[in-house]
Amino acid sequence: MPKLTIDGRPVEVSSGTRLIEACKQAGVVVPHFCYHPGLSVAGNCRMCMVEIEMGGRSRVAASCVEPALDGMTIRTASAEVLDTRQGVMEFLLLNHPIDCPYCDCAGECKLQDYYMEWGAIDTGSRRETEAVHKPKRQEIGPHVMLDSERCVLCSRCVRFCQEVTGTHELGIEERGSHSTLHLAEGKSLDNPYSGNVVDLCPVGALTDRDFRFQRRVWFLRKADSICPGCSKGCNLELQFDEQRDYKNPASGRRVQRVKPRFNEQVNQWWLCDRGRYGYPAIDQGRLEQPRVTRDSQLALTDWEDALGEAARHLDDELRRHADQTAVLFSPDMSCEDLLAARSLFLDQLKVTRADYQLELDPRGVEDGLLMKADLHPNRAGCAALGLKRGAFADGHLLDEIRSGRVRSLVCFHWDLPALLGAEARELLTHLRFLLVITPREQAWDTLAHVQLPAAVTAEQSGSFINCDGLGQRFQAAFAPLGAAHRGVDLLLELGARLGRRPAQATLDALVKRLEAEVPALRGLQMPLAPARHVSKEAAPR
Amino acid sequence: MARFVNVDRQATLKTALYYPAVWTGLWITARHFFVNMGRHTLHAIGLKGGKPGSTTLQYPEVMRPLPRVLRSLHRIKVHEDGRPKCTACMLCETACPDFCISITPMEHDGSPEEKAPAEFRIDLDRCCFCGFCVEACPKDAIYMDTQIMEISSDRRENFILRLPELLDPRPLLCTGPEFRGKSVEKVLPHLSWRRLDHVTPVRVDLSYRTEQLARLHAGNPGTRPAGLE
């Protein structure tokens, strides 16, 4: 265990630690462009130079390359270091275009930050020749825009494509100040993780085509969330701007972009493009208002009416044909929603037929990195809450409906009309009562008797258990769209209409119960928004 | 609790002195009126030797010289080829303490800056004329030097400046009842007393945003969060 002194502070680090990491442990941030803990060390930006004194001699060296050794004395801000840093900044800024006013990276750009901190020196203009110009505005892939002029040649993106995805799309050509980031011959940056190079780029050379010119980064607010795209449960940050949206009503999107959040156990620094660019589903294609089918006519209605209608029918069905009633839970629901649904339907209303899986469920692509074939974020949560598979007698929902053993159904989230196909849709008309609770606008038409709009992951706090059995909590970013309500509130209110007092009347109580019941969800830290009741909210007018 | 008291106000010598004072005041006002009318008549028939009829400025025909640093109505400068100097960098929107600026940016293929405003709105109802937007602009695009200060209307929407008015603010002066329904070219000769040369763009070309505007207006506003408007 080498012991060393960094800026006067004694530190002990594990052997083999790079100096730059040792400095981080000592609480000193060394500026750097090319170093990234998730990639190999390139040591080419020379920004992380520190002064190393050992055995009576001192030298300036790149801290990302040098391993920490016993007895080293490191100075990260000596006159010599500052001089080196300023020299590096001068070279970097020599040909760097002043695109900041229209560069999407402005505000989160390392070059900008370091210029303000280390490079704002007046060296006078030494330019005698025209600046080197390189190609701008190159669409190098479906998600990434390249501006070679802004590139500082840190090669992080190149190393990412070599080491993480192994697709080798990017390389650096030419020499000296003419070095340029290039796509490999005949290739396009279209691997399923291409969006990560935008996060890796310390400057505005690689920018997001999807986020291009949408908002300036300093307007964005963020919420910690979990990707609902597959069972991996990658940690991500939803970056959104509600304040400015009313000024641009036509833009119609609240989430501006999605960025990965570091989690050693799950996704490290990365996020797949499917998760990163899947956020339009938060605002588009949503069910915004309760719907009721009366006399074969679909009508938009308010919560009072829809909940009353649902409770009346459900009560009637349960009273007369309790054994013909089934509940189809969804592995897209959070653990809190599942618990509330379970305690209402299974524990209190004593429904015996329930399941959370469909045979028709489409599977996604699985690779060795992040993407999982199971496209539902909380299948493990369903199992952890004791929901049983194959509770239908023959294990197949359609057979049950066809044979008339199931005559009324409560369906969460599943898009049955799309999954069943045209001919099987006819089966659903045999149901006496069909209650649908979903955040999505689905093609139920008049098939469903009542459709209640639920919130999506971004709009509620909750927790998922991922494919590795890891429990993770997520935070609500903003209020549910339109008249939609969080699943927990909605179920509590429905329970109240059915004359059932829930055992856990608030979200906090639900969370406590979950923690007691599911070991994976114990001790998760993240603030949860207080529970609100549906009936206290104004109904849509 | 209200209390009513009847007071009998008798005319005394002291109060009677009021009447001569009223007549004196009226006489002074009338004298100034007739003397000034005489001076203006002399001025009108050319007997004042080029001097003004009186020391009063005959606004709006005559404009008081305004200091050059005065912060008046905003404008956005244009390049020689007619495209706005603004690159929609949003620094003015960021600096604005009143949140009165809102910019919708778009990709502009014909511009070396790649980015241009599809819409630029300034809500004058909110503006406090602090000039922070001018200070913040890195492109030297927004100015408050039009010397236009007469901003009045009976409609709120008329206080929202958009890109065309910002690039050429002259039509804003043609809103008086006597100008209603007349073209800018017809009205401008009547505004010869205005110094408008410096705000007159050689050319304004907003054709780059036609498609984008159509797309924006066709956009679906139904998905915006409720309660913000």
Image: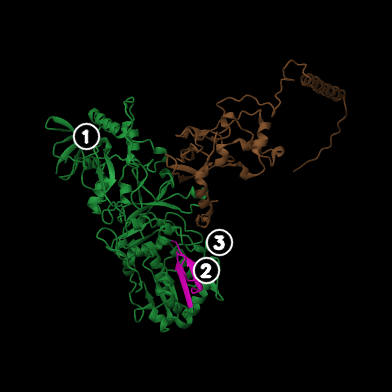
Which chain is represented by green in the image? A
Q: Are marks 2 and 3 on the same chain?
A: yes
Q: Which residue is mark 2?
A: A291
Q: Residue at x 52, y 66 (%)?
A: A290
Which region is colored magenta? A433-455
Q: Mark 1 and mark 2 in contact? Answer it, CB < 8 Å.
A: no
Q: Position of residue A184 (x, y in %)?
A: 26, 49
Name of the residue lying farthest toward the left: A55
In the image, residue A96 above or below residue A429:
above
Q: Which of disc 3 and disc 2 is earlier in sequence?
A: 2
User: Magenta span has A445?
Assistant: yes
The CA distance from mark 1 to mark 3 is: 62 Å
Q: Residue at x 78, y 16 (%)?
A: B47
Q: Which residue is mark 1?
A: A50
In the image, residue A156 above or below residue B186:
below
Q: Position of residue A46 (x, y in %)?
A: 23, 36
